[in-house]
């Protein structure tokens, strides 16, 4: 770091200290729901995903393999961990199949933490098939934040890629996967 | 596109007067803001603990700002520990120089960008262009603005002033100049427009080596950066390039990872009225081998922090709920505010950051009817009307206005003087002009003078109470009085 940069750092910190001098401290009230309990996590998660126009299947754990085979038949699917994939291969693939780190019922959100594959692998293919176990579904956002490790890069996914940039109406499908399909195993 | 809006010399009233004549603009804005308003209310009402989240969000931000020096140092240490490099920028020029040097060090001449208010504020794209580096905006609305050589007019939807057929025209006319052309048979169907943007940018994402982003939040405890988005362009820029440079205002800090549980609920529901935005990316330092640089930007923020009333504006999480509910914004659009920060929050943030040096900045505290809808909608409870009123007192006022206010204060502060003034006004009420001459016309041209009544309330009260005491029955209220005349 050169002296000019060090000067900027010290100057900004000095300005802050002068600006807040004598200001009172602030207590943080946490009267909101710090844990969210929902009666039917699987049902609510499936309903919220559907609102985002994701495709949802709820199947018994024993039937997951057959369901995956059915949905991916004839498709060139990226399976992270299987081997290394180049960017061009990823972009040319039909889809990617992954698990997830955690899922949130109230917001219909899936979180990936790169243990399911590198970030590019779940981004470039146009179709994302995600497997969620019922015991991975938590009630609300606070429950998820508490269970996630920020040291890993996280990707929170709530439905397929979308934009509200044209007249503030949601349109599905811009740069990320345009189709999100989720298998919830119970 | 310019971050400094040099093309707008007039004050807000002059800009607004032009904007409200544009019926297409008013139609586009009305449609968009009314759509989002109803949705936001629904998204907020769905949560039983919204007010508690709002109180927590406000307090977390105030607490952070109180100890900003400590948390910034903690952030710097955590990012450095995780393999990132932290830079400090006092102002726009310093931030632009840091980013330019970092890009040049990679040997690249092109960068992809994730939508960022901070880099618009410092005019980064223009600075890079002057240094021979092309910055490609990748957010759909930013792309529309960049291709249309236009200015952003909304935080979240910078091209809110454009409707679908205008967007189609821009894509057809301009995409070829920047890269892959739009398909010749492009329709104005929004999915078709989104698809054209997807194809236009796909090769760029795969080829780019350097990305520049902003950040919605920074977590001091862990050194984590957080970016919320919808389209996936953010994920592309944050994930694929070898080098990532994030320019983030120092007020974007949150103390702990846990604090995200509040803001990941407040922000999506307030901005796009969704339970959650499609994509949120978080990363800490160098992720998956990327070269990561964080530029911490002051650029006037410490000045805002020193303003005891105005500092609450630094709580802003750029959700744009205040823009969407504002009756003034709905009619004038964002350009009239002459800043990257339009709408109610812009009307306080811009003069707080830049001062009152220009006619435009001095006029912004008046760009409001003080109706308070913005305060109600704000997820971090920024009392925008309070700050507006405080800024109005701080704006330099003309000699004539100051003299007039002094006289008015002298009269209004004393009941005998007020009664005398009212009687005088009543007696000569036929002679009071509708429009004042000379410099005073600036006051009367934008205000309707109320009709002066034949009798002041004060006099009516005196007269009727006196007659009550003398025992004569009277009708009550103003109507009774006028019937007797």
Image (cartoon, grey):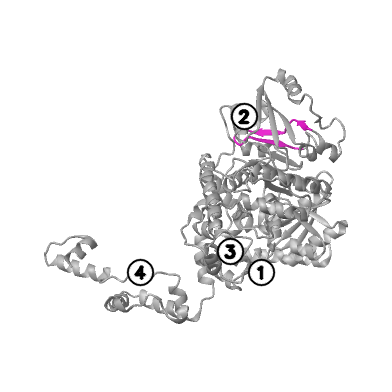
Q: Nearer the viewer, residue B161 or B325?
A: B161
What is the x, y in percent for residue B320?
58, 53
Vertically, is B37 above or below B428? above
Is circle 1 on the same chain as circle 3?
Answer: yes
Q: Read off the residue under disc 2.
A: A46
The residue to which callout 4 is attached is B450
Q: Nearer the viewer, residue A170 or A22?
A: A170
User: Mark 1, chain letter?
Assistant: B
Q: In the rendered structure, are the residues bearing label 1 and label 2 in contact, judged by CB atoms less than 8 Å apart? A: no
Mark 3 to mark 2 CA distance (whole Å):
43 Å
Up/down of B153 relative to A59, above or below: below
Q: Which residue is mark 3?
A: B337
* Range shown magenta: A94-113
User: Residue B5, image x and y in percent?
Assistant: 65, 66
Nearest the camera: B84 or B151?
A: B151
Q: Residues within 10 Å of mark 4 (few under 14, many from 20)?
A: few
Q: Is residue B30 left or right of residue B456?
A: right
């Amino acid at each position: 770091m050169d002296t000019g940069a060090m000067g900027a750092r010290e100057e900004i910190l000095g300005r802050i200290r002068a600006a807040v001098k004598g200001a009172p401290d602030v207590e943080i009230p946490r009267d909101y729901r710090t844990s969210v309990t929902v009666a039917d996590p699987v049902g609510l998660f499936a309903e919220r995903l559907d609102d985002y126009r994701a495709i949802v299947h709820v199947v018994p754990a024993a039937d997951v393999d057959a369901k995956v085979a059915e949905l991916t038949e004839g498709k060139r699917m990226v399976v992270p961990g299987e081997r290394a994939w180049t960017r061009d291969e990823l972009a040319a693939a039909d889809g990617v199949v992954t698990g997830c780190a955690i899922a949130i019922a109230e917001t219909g959100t899936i979180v990936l933490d790169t243990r399911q594959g590198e970030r590019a692998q779940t981004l470039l293919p146009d179709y994302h098939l995600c497997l969620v176990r019922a015991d991975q579904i938590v009630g609300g956002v606070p429950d998820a934040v508490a269970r996630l490790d920020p040291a890993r890069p996280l990707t929170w996914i709530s439905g397929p890629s979308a934009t509200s940039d044209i007249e503030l109406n949601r349109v599905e499908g811009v740069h990320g996967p345009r189709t999100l399909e989720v298998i919830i195993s119970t | 596109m310019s971050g400094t809006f040099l093309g707008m010399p007039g004050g807000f009233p002059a800009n607004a007067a032009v904007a409200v004549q544009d019926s297409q603009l008013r139609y586009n804005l009305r449609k968009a803001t009314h759509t989002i308003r109803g949705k936001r209310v629904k998204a907020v009402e769905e949560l039983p603990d919204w007010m508690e989240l709002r109180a927590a969000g406000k307090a977390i931000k105030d607490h952070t700002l109180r100890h900003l020096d400590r948390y910034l140092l903690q952030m710097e240490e955590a990012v450095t520990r995780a393999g990132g490099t932290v830079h400090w920028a006092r102002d726009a020029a310093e931030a632009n120089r840091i980013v330019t040097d970092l890009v040049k060090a990679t040997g690249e001449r092109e960068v992809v960008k994730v939508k960022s208010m901070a880099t618009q504020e410092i005019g980064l794209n223009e600075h890079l262009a002057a240094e021979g580096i092309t910055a490609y905006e990748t957010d759909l609305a930013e792309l529309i603005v960049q291709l249309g050589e236009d200015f952003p007019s909304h935080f979240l939807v910078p091209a809110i002033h454009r409707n679908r057929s205008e967007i189609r025209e821009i894509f057809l006319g301009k995409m070829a100049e920047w890269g892959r052309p739009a398909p010749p048979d492009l329709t104005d169907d929004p999915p078709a427009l989104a698809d054209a943007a997807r194809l236009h940018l796909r090769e760029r994402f795969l080829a780019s080596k350097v990305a520049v982003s902003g950040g919605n939040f920074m977590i001091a405890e862990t050194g984590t950066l957080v970016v919320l988005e919808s389209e996936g362009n953010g994920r592309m820029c944050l994930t694929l390039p070898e080098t990532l440079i994030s320019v983030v205002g120092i007020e974007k800090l949150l103390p702990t990872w846990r604090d995200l549980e509040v803001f990941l609920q407040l922000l999506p529901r307030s901005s796009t009225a969704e339970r959650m935005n499609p994509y949120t990316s978080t990363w800490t330092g160098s992720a998956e081998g990327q070269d990561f640089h964080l530029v911490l930007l002051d650029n006037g923020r410490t000045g805002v922090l020193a303003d005891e009333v105005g500092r609450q504006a630094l709580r802003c999480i750029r959700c744009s709920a205040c823009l969407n509910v504002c009756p003034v914004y709905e009619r004038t659009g964002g350009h009239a505010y002459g800043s990257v920060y339009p709408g109610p929050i812009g009307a306080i943030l811009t003069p707080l950051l830049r001062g009152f040096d220009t006619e435009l900045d001095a006029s912004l505290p008046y760009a409001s009817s003080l109706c308070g809808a913005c305060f109600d909608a704000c997820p971090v409870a920024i009392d925008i009307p309070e700050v507006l009123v405080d800024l109005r007192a701080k704006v330099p006022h003309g000699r004539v206005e100051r003299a007039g206010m002094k006289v008015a204060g002298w009269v209004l502060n004393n009941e005998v003087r007020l009664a005398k003034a009212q009687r005088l006004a009543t007696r000569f009420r036929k002679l009071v002009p509708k429009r004042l001459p000379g410099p005073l016309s600036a006051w009367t041209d934008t205000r309707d003078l109320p009709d002066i009544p034949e009798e002041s309330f004060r006099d009516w009260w005196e007269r009727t109470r006196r007659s009550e005491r003398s025992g004569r029955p009277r009708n009550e209220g103003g109507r009774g009085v006028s019937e007797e005349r």
